[in-house]
Amino acid sequence: MGEKDYNAPMHSAEHILNGTMDKLFNCGRAFSSHVERKKSKCDYHFERPLREEELQQLENKVNEVIAQHFEVTEDFISRDEAEKLFNFSRLPESAGEMLRIIRIGDYDACPCIGMHVQNTSEIGKFKIISSDYKEGVLRIRFKREDNN
């Protein structure tokens, strides 16, 4: 098993969280994240803490997307084409001229080199553990629970 294989469900959940944060709050994707099997965190540029009902809405929406059983696919497009469509702030320069785009159904698309599930049904239940806000940074900590 490859080094990143263990967190494929969590990594796919992170993509859905990022897409949902941007759709709900127009804040863009996380500028920093740390994804691990047991728990993960994403940091967003934000102007305030999220209220409890907003956190619940966010968690519910991520779980709704997971429940759609979207296929997770990859496409390869040129860097020039990708630069017109995506934010490259977290993509290493070494990514090359052809970039891998991970698509979660028609819900989310993002350049990525990580391992992912083949279908969102493999992710399990998404759960926000906590969030905090400090000096323009909103941090969301989350985990996933297997479907067992």
Image (cartoon, rainbow, N blue to C red):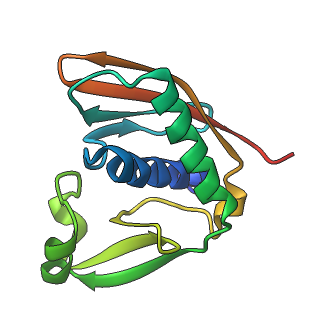
Q: Nearest the camera: 68 or 51?
A: 51
Residue 135 in percent (x, y) is at 18, 17
- Rendered-image quadrant of the C terminus: top right
Residue 143 in percent (x, y) is at 60, 34
Residue 15 in percent (x, y) is at 45, 54
Q: Nearest the camera: 100 or 13?
A: 13
- Rendered-image quadrant of the N terminus: bottom right
- Position of residue 138 relative to residue 80, above or below, is above
- Position of residue 83 relative to residue 63, above or below, is below
Q: Is residue 21 left or right of residue 98?
A: right
Inspect this view and state whether residue 42 appears: yes
Residue at position x 53%, y 55% in the image: 12
Residue at position x 17%, y 78% in the image: 79
Inspect this view and state whether residue 1 appears: no
Residue 20 in percent (x, y) is at 43, 51
Residue at position x 43%, y 29% in the image: 140
Q: Nearest the camera: 97 or 11?
A: 11
